[in-house]
């Protein structure tokens, strides 16, 4: 417990005021006429104690006792998730195939790949109360927009802001993966760690880049998921019989092959429609509910009200005793007159 105004506690010796002796001596003709009233003596001491308690409670309430903001840990079910969202210009284009149903008109956006990703990421984050999220935008460079946080409000606001503006021209997935690894540098391992890559493009990596990415993913014990948003051509990540020769050796396939060769958990999802994107997000959501150490920031809690309640109850009792005394004296006075 802390105090906002601790200097006021120096006034606590004022609680001795009710015990300061007062000159209440009376002239008695015969001492035997003065009865020994034990009840009155006890009541007198009780009222003094109560008055001291009221003074102390009021002083401590004015000093504003409180429990400072602090962090608590508990066990939850979830994961630590770094979302890597492609900000290239191609993400402003629609999916390769038309979907079989339309989303609610309340969404009110053009169905570009980036807009749909924003919508389903919002649902994904909202459905996972214990997860810790980080957020990275990337094109030619990667920007760590949001470091790992438990705040759902901050994460959702960041996702919503990701829909603003236009995409850029180039894409470098390697810098995005490096940024994801950097976000875990110095972090205590709490449980499952996921890198969720959402992109419609690929990249042919150099040997140095591949080694660096592999080392980052292994050192931080990361699982990698790639939601590949198909372009208008409709190319798949794995070779299909009778496909166009133009798709052989595509950067997306090179990247997919490299990811499969990593010694970390990896899974790719190909989304060419809203149905497939929703299914991919649902699949990822169901896979990672592991025991996770969750940190929660507890806000400052004021304790002044408790002391005010003590003071109020004490004042009510003191007031009641004074009213009772007044009625008793008045009744005795009236009886002597009659």
Image (cartoon, rainbow, N blue to C red):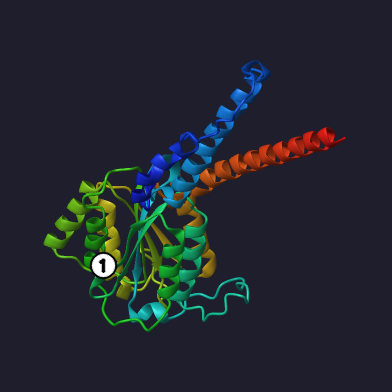
Query: Could you tell whether 237 is left or right of 311 in the image?
Result: left
Q: Pick the quarter of the image with the N terminus.
A: top left
Q: Relative to residue 73, is residue 133 depicted above or below?
A: below
How many labels, in total? Answer: 1
User: Does the image show residue 178?
Assistant: yes
Q: Position of residue 130 (x, y in %)?
A: 45, 49
In the displayed structure image, the side of residue 239 where residue 323 appears, left or right: right
Quadrant that contains the C terminus: top right
Q: Where is residue 148 in the image (x, y as percent from the top left)?
A: 33, 57
> Which residue: 46% across, 39% down?
17
The residue carrying pointer 1 sits among few (fewer than 14), some (14 to 19) or many (20 or more) residues within 10 Å by Cα, namely many
Where residue 201 sits, quadrant-wise, is bottom left
Q: Nearer the viewer, residue 255 or 283?
A: 283
Vertically, is 168 above or below 296? below
Task: Locate residue 37, reporting x and y percent.
Answer: 65, 20
In the displayed orientation, state which residue is furthest to the top: 32
Q: Residue at x 38, y 46 (%)?
A: 11
Q: Quadrant of residue 45?
A: top right
Task: Point out residue 145 in the picture as x, y percentages from the top left corner.
Answer: 31, 68
Q: In this view, does 69 lie to the left or right of 103?
A: left
Element at label 1? helix
> Residue placed farthest to the left in the image?
208
Q: Judge from the rendering whether residue 263 lies leftward or rightward of residue 8; answer left or right.
A: left
Q: Can residue 293 be seen in this view?
A: no
Q: Name the residue under label 1.
A: 173
Q: Which of 144 and 180 is in front in this view?
A: 144
Q: Between residues 194 and 90, which one lies in front from this camera angle?
A: 194
The residue sitting at 35% across, 49% down in the picture is 6
In the image shown, does 123 or 62 lie closer to the viewer? 62
In the image, farthest residue toward the front: 29
């Amino acid at each position: 417990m802390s105090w906002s105004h601790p200097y006021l506690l120096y006034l606590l010796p004022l609680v001795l005021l009710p015990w300061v002796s007062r000159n209440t001596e009376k002239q008695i003709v015969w001492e035997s006429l003065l009865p020994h009233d034990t009840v009155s003596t006890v009541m007198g001491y009780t009222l003094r104690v109560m008055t001291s308690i009221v003074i102390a409670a009021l002083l401590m309430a004015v000093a504003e006792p409180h429990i400072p903001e602090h962090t608590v840990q508990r066990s939850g079910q979830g994961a630590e998730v770094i979302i890597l969202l492609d900000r290239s210009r191609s993400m402003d284009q629609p999916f390769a195939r038309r979907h079989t149903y339309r989303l609610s008109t309340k969404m009110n956006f053009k169905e570009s790949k980036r807009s749909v990703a924003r919508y389903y990421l919002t649902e994904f984050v909202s459905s996972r109360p214990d997860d810790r999220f980080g957020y990275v935008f990337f094109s030619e460079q990667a920007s760590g927009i949001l470091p790992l946080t438990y705040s759902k409000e901050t994460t959702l606001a960041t996702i919503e802001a990701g829909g603003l503006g236009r995409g850029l021209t180039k894409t470098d997935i390697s810098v995005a993966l490096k940024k994801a690894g950097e976000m875990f540098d110095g972090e205590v391992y709490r449980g499952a760690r996921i890198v969720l890559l959402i992109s419609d493009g690929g990249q042919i990596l150099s040997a140095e880049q591949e080694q660096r990415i592999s080392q980052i993913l292994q050192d931080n014990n990361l699982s990698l998921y790639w939601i590949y948003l198909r372009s208008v051509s409709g190319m798949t990540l794995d070779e299909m019989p009778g496909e166009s020769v133009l798709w052989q050796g595509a950067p997306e396939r090179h990247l997919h092959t490299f990811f499969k060769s990593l010694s970390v958990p990896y899974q790719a999802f190909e989304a060419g429609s809203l149905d497939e994107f929703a299914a991919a997000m649902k699949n990822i959501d169901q896979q990672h509910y592991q025991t996770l150490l969750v940190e929660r920031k507890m806000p400052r809690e004021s304790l002044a009200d408790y002391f005010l309640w003590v003071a109020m109850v004490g004042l009510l009792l003191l007031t009641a005793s004074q009213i009772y005394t007044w009625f008793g004296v008045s009744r005795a006075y009236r009886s002597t007159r009659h």
